[in-house]
Amino acid sequence: MTTTLTTGQVTGLTAQAATAATYASVDATGALLPDWYINNNGVAVYAGADIATRGVGIYGQTPDNLVLVGLLKSAALSLITDPSMTITVLNTPAVWTGVYNINSLADYLNAPTLQNQVQIALLEGAYQGLVDYGIITGTEDARYIATFLQPAVRYGVDAVFAYLQGSADLAMASAIEIAGRQGQYAIDFVDTYGADLSIAPAPPSSNNTVVRDQVDQAVTNVIDNPKIPNLEYANTAAITADVAAATTAAALIANTANIVITIPPNANDDGTFRFAPGSSQG
């Protein structure tokens, strides 16, 4: 039976990705650090040279991610001949496709809702990619799947496959292990505390009356629910994507051709995140 991640589990994975991509934006005096600015939504965003390692936006998405969802032209990747070129290329309007009215890095940094939809699309695409590679069957428990899914979204399915084959370099292997444990933590947290965080008392019976305490509590639950985006009162003409956009982006990822490989045979595994073959750990 295929495992379907719950809404709470997906929320946990995206929240964990956002946490991993969070950096300090102000100094001890509260002043913005260099290369940070306040976007149209009043949020500090980073647009400096370290974007090559920090990634883009809320979730630290990579240029490869943005190509997969159709926001960046594929030729943009060939222009990034060195990590230091990443910010220069992303600041070039010509490399953006204009999909969803995103025509520049600033446009994308000003579109948090779209960034969230892209992250979910990347999760969907990476899930299918892991199945196609034979890394997972899709029938394992959510914790096992998240172990590979979280690093696959950030670094690519190819990188996870190389790691499992023992051919990833030490820096990438370490990054994949960290992301894998973050995926496990996100699932463990949601499965352990999800019910407690979603408590909503059943409304008492009434006869054409309004129970104000219940209404107030319900409104509070909605406002504080991380699954519900914050209302945006700024000009959002550049943010036209909706759920259909995420579906379309996921389809683009799923249809992207991967390198031809020999799918490794299935192996018995207890679900524990394992180190690269040959390691004494795991």
Image (cartoon, rainbow, N blue to C red):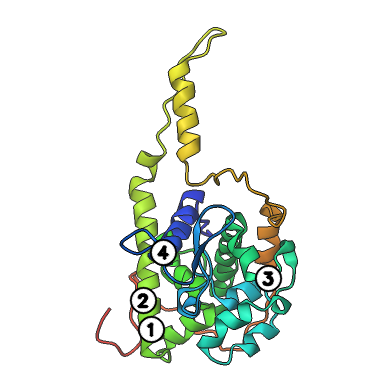
Quadrant location, the C terminus: bottom left
Q: In the image, residue 182 lies at what x, y percent? A: 37, 66
| Callout 2 amino acid | Glu
Give the distance between the C-alpha atoms of the residues marked 4 and 1, in whole angstroms. Answer: 28 Å
* Residue 197 placement, left or right of 64: left
State which mark lies toward you, 2 or 4: 4
What residue is pinned by disc 1? Answer: 173
Label 4 is placed on what type of residue? Ser
Q: Using the numbered discs, state the Cα–Cα distance from disc 1 to disc 3 in whole angstroms.
A: 28 Å
Q: Which residue is mark 3?
A: 71
Q: Position of residue 48 (x, y in %)?
A: 50, 75
Element carrying mark 2: helix
Of pointers 4 and 1, the one earlier in the residue sequence: 4
The answer to whether the residue labelled 3 contacts the one labelled 4, judged by CB atoms less than 8 Å apart, is no
Quarter of the rendering containing residue 275: bottom left
Query: Where does label 2 land, which residue?
Result: 177
Real-space Cα separation, disc 2 to disc 4, in angstroms: 27 Å
How many other residues sit within 10 Å of disc 2, few (<14), some (14-19) or many (≥20)? Answer: many
Compared to residue 223, the image places residue 53 above or below, namely below
Residue furthest out toward the left: 280
How busy is the neighbourhood of tag 1: few (under 14 within 10 Å), some, or many (20 plus)? many
Three-letter code, disc 1: Ala
Q: Are marks 2 and 4 in contact (CB under 8 Å)?
A: no
| Mark earlier in primary sequence (3, 4) | 4
